[in-house]
Image: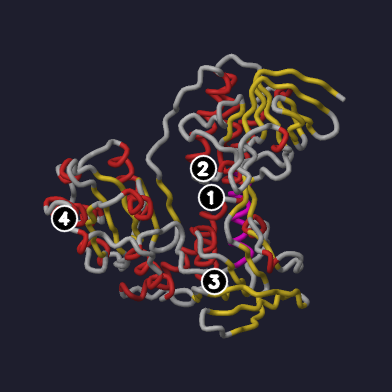
Amino acid sequence: MNKLNVDVAVIGAGTAGLAAYRAATARGQRAVIIESGPYGTTCARVGCMPSKLLIAASEAAHMLAAAPGFGVHPGTVRIDGKAVMARVRSERDRFVGFVLEGVDNIPQCDKLRGHARFTGPQSLRIGDHTTLEAARIVIATGSRPALPPALREVGPGVIVSDDVFDWTDLPASVAVVGSGVIGLELGQALSRLGVRVSIFARGGSVAQLTDPDILHVAAKALTDELDLRFQTDVTGARQDGEHVILNTRDAAGAERSERFQYVLAAAGRTPNLDDIGIETTGLELDERGIPLFDSRTMQCGASHIFIAGDADNERPVLPEAADQGRIAGDNAGGYPDVRPGLRRAPLTIAFTEPQIATLGANYRELCKGGKFAIGKVSFENQGRSRVMLQNRGMLRVYGEYGTGRFLGAEMIAPRAENLGHLLAWACQARLTVHEMLDMPFYHPVIEEGVRTALRDLAANLAKGVPDTSSATDCTPGV
C-alpha cells in the first residue's frame, strides 16, 4: 500500500476538479487529482457537446421541413441515421481529445487512478493501492443520471442520456421520461430526425422554467410539435425482446401500454456522494446527503473540505462548475485564508426550439422575496422573428420597485441563447431598466423584443408598488 502526504487532494477530474487542481497548484501547493473513471469531462464526453451535435443535425433536417414556408421546396429528404451518429461520435471524440490534452499536461505524479473514499476528515483511500493524508480536500465527484424506481432492472432497452452518444444508428422509437432540459433537448432532436418520440412528464414542468406565463407558452409551443404528455406517471416497464413495454397512467387515471425500442430516463441527475465515505468526515449534511457549504467560498462549514461542480447540486451547468472549482481550489490552496470568489449571474439555457433561457433571479425566487414588477413581450408579431418564421414564444423581465434595478428574466424565444447572455450581463452589471433602455438597438433584430419588454417593465415600475388586490400572482403555473 502506497502512502502519500499532500497539501490538497482533489477528488474528481471533471470540469470542477480540473479547475480546482489548477487553482491549488497556482497557489504553490502540492496537489493531486484523483479519478476513477475515464478522463474527459461530462460536458465533452456525454453532455453539452455531443447533445448539441445531435441537435445541429436535427436543425438541418428541420430547416428543410420548414423551407416550403418560404416558397423553397427541397424535394425528397433522406436522413442517414448512421451518418448522423458517426458525426456525433467523431466530433465528440475530438472535443474529448482537447480535454485529454489538458490532462496529459498534468505531471504524472499528481494523477491518481482509482475510487477515492474518505477514511477520516483528512484521509483518503484510493482503490486498494494508496492511502493519502491531505491538509485540504476538494470534493468534485460530479453526478450521474438518475433512474426512476419503475425503470430499474428492466433490461438493455432502458437507457440514460450517456448511452445515446454511443449509438451507431438512430433507433425507430424512443420514450423519454422527464421534461427537463436533457429530456426536451434530446426528445425534440430525435423527433426531428425521424424517430418516433413520446415524452412523459410527471408534472407540468418545462425545462428550468418557473414563470407560469412562460410555462404556459412553452407547453403549447412544444406540444404543438411533440408528443409531450404532462401529468403522466410511468407505472412500470418490462423488456420484450428488442423492445420495452412501457406502462403509464395519466391525470384522469387512463392507463396505456406502449412499445418503444428504447426508454430514455431523463429525470435529473444524482450527485456522486453516496459512495465516498462522506459520513467519516464529520461534515453536516442536508436531507439529500450533500454537505452544507458556503456558495461564495465553496467551503463546507468551517472545515478544510470544499465542494464544487455537480456534486453540490447548486447550479449543475458547466460554467458554474468551472467557477466553483476555481474558487474551491483557490481557497483550498490558501486555507485558512478563505475568501469569497466571483459568482456570476445565473444563466441556464435549453437548446430546444424555441430555445429556453432563465437568468438572474427567476420568478419563483422573486416570489419568495415579495413584490416586483414584470414586463413582457410576445414574439408572435415581433418583426425579425416573423421574417425568420420563428415567431413563437414569450419573454418576461423582472424589476425592483424603488431602485428600478433589473433582476432577471425567463423566456422561450427564438435565439434565446443570445438574448439570455445580453440580459445576464445587464443583471450582473446591476443595471437599471432605464440604463438598459439607453443602450443601442438595431432594426430589424430580435433584440427589439427585449426593448419592448423593458419598456413594459419600465411603465409598470413607474406605477409604483401595487396594492394587495393587484399584486403579482405567485401561484404555480402549469
Indicate the amino acid at tag 3: Ile
Indicate the amino acid at tag 4: Asn
Using the rendered view, name the quadrant where residue 218 is placed: bottom left
Indicate the amino acid at tag 1: Cys
Q: Assign a secondary structure to mark 4.
A: helix
**Are discs 1 and 2 less than 8 Å apart at CB?**
yes
- Disc 3 target residue: 199
Residue 131 picture location, percent across and down = 80, 26
Q: Which dot marks residue 48?
A: 1
* Vertical order, 24 against 36 (above or below): above
Q: Furthest-top residue in view?
A: 28
Q: Assign a secondary structure to mark 1.
A: helix
Q: Name the mark nearer the viewer: 1 or 2.
A: 2
Quarter of the image where the N terminus is located: top right
Give the dominant element type of the magenta stretch: helix, strand or loop: helix
Q: Name the mark nearer the viewer: 3 or 4.
A: 4
Which of the two residues, 439 or 167, is positioned nearer the viewer here?
439
- Disc 2 target residue: 318
- Disc 4 target residue: 460
- Span colored in magenta: 81-94
* Vertical order, 378 against 272 (above or below): below
